[in-house]
Image (cartoon, rainbow, N blue to C red):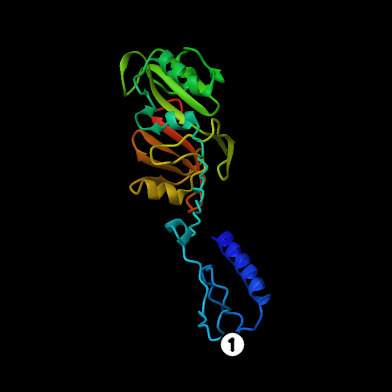
């Protein structure tokens, strides 16, 4: 539309120049003129000619009448935080670790965890239970993935008569009777169904499990918590900001915490 108005102004300027070259003068304001159609008469325009007050370009189409500028704002971008497949698949519970439930075949359980964590970092092989802990049965095996230790045996509260998976511990630490020193927390990031993991503060642990039981430290173990008979662990103290340093699932005779 701006071009059309400029073109109209240019034509008007030419018309004014043409009128200025004729004899006689136009009385009154010279900034407002009415343009007459061309005729064959040569009589001069009377000086009393009525002058229109405004020259307004009349739009001829709807597009001329409205100059619409459409601005499209880019949609806000979000960055998705990738979830570690191991953390997502290996949820710690009172029934096992993800799809590796208690009573599972030892080789199948080890293969399942290895598919996410890589090969085990340690494996005792099948040994006499008393070489590892005060466990029942005739054979026992502990397979480790960093600080995640899986216990297998042929006798447990879960099952008797064949080798099977029946307990795990996650997180290792040293305790001198006063202070807890974390020694290993790999593989990093594993959590329970309620998002409790190593490093979770006690105040958040209690919020996730309001009915848990807390036990004071003794000469051998730091403060511990019990969610139920098959899910418990250890913390660095009883203050709100004390942190979880160990999570135990199942009845682990190899770790009597």
Q: Is residue 66 visible?
A: no
Q: Nearer the viewer, residue 66 or 84?
A: 66
Residue at 67% in and 72% down: 17
Residue at 50% in and 51% down: 72
**Quarter of the view holding residue 35:** bottom right
Residue most toward the right? Answer: 21
Q: Residues within 10 Å of mark 1 (few under 14, many from 20)?
A: few
Instruction: Report the residue marked by disc 1.
Output: 28
**Quarter of the view holding residue 172:** top right
Q: Nearer the viewer, residue 19 or 209?
A: 19
Rendering coords of residue 24 (x, y %) = 65, 83
Rendering coords of residue 177 (x, y %) = 55, 42
Q: Nearer the viewer, residue 251 or 189?
A: 189
Depicted 27 relative to depicted 82: above or below: below
Tally of numbered discs: 1
Rendering coords of residue 159 (x, y %) = 31, 19
Depicted 180 relative to depicted 48: above or below: above
Depicted 47 relative to depicted 6: above or below: below
Is label 1 in a helix, a strand or a loop?
loop
Rendering coords of residue 127 (x, y %) = 47, 13
**31 left or right, relative to 229:** right
Q: Is residue 69 visible?
A: yes
Residue at 45% in and 47% down: 216
Residue at 61% in and 65% down: 11
């Amino acid at each position: 539309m701006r071009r059309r108005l400029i073109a109209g102004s240019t034509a008007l300027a030419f018309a004014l120049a043409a009128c200025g070259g004729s004899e006689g003068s136009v009385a009154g304001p010279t900034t407002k003129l009415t343009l007459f159609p061309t005729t064959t008469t040569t009589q001069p325009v009377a000086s009393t000619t009525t002058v229109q007050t405004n020259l307004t370009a009349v739009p001829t189409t709807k597009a001329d009448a409205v100059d619409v500028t459409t601005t499209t704002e880019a949609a806000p971008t979000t960055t998705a935080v990738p979830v570690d497949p191991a953390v997502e698949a290996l949820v710690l519970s009172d029934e096992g670790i993800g799809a590796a439930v208690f009573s599972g075949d030892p080789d199948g359980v080890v293969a399942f965890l290895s598919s996410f964590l890589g090969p085990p970092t340690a494996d005792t092989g099948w040994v006499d239970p008393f070489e590892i802990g005060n466990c029942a049965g005739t054979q026992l095996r502990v397979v480790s993935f960093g600080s995640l230790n899986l216990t297998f045996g042929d006798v447990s509260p879960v099952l008797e008569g064949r080798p099977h998976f029946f307990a795990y511990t996650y997180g290792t630490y040293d305790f001198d009777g006063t202070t807890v020193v974390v020694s290993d927390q790999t593989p990093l990031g594993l959590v329970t169904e309620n998002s409790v993991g190593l490093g979770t503060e006690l105040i958040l642990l209690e919020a996730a499990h309001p009915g848990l039981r807390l036990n004071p430290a003794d000469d051998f173990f730091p403060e511990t918590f019990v969610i139920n008979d098959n899910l418990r662990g250890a913390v660095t103290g009883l203050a709100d900001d004390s942190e979880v340093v160990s999570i135990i699932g199942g009845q682990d005779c190899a770790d009597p915490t």
